[in-house]
């Protein structure tokens, strides 16, 4: 249950959270396979998706 008392603040919080996750997820995904050789990147992405 949310501790936010006004519905518009909950909407804003959800919007900010969704935007932030949309910005950070691709960065973390790219960093997770940065040091993997090109021929093993498919396997690394599969591991990333499962984990």
Image (tube, rainbow, N blue to C red):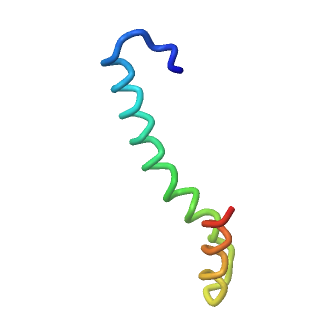
Q: Quadrant of residue 15?
A: top left
- Percent of width and height locating residue 35: 68, 73
**Image point 63% across, 70% down: which residue?**
34
**Image point 50% across, 19% down: which residue?**
2
Reply above or below: 41 against 2: below
Q: Quadrant of the C terminus?
A: bottom right
Is residue 41 found left or right of 12 in the rendered image? right
What residue occupies the far bottom of the structure in this picture? 39
What residue occupies the far top of the structure in this picture? 5
- Percent of width and height locating residue 5: 42, 9
Reply above or below: 28 against 34: above
Q: Quadrant of residue 7?
A: top left
Is residue 12 found left or right of 22 in the rendered image? left
- Percent of width and height locating residue 20: 45, 41
- Percent of width and height locating residue 18: 41, 41
Reply above or below: 4 against 48: above
**Image point 61% across, 86% down: which residue?**
38
């Amino acid at each position: 249950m949310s501790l936010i008392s006004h519905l518009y603040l909950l909407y804003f919080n959800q919007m900010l959270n969704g935007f932030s996750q949309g910005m950070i997820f691709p960065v973390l995904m790219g960093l997770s396979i940065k040091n993997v050789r090109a021929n093993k990147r498919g396997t690394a992405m599969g591991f990333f998706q499962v984990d």
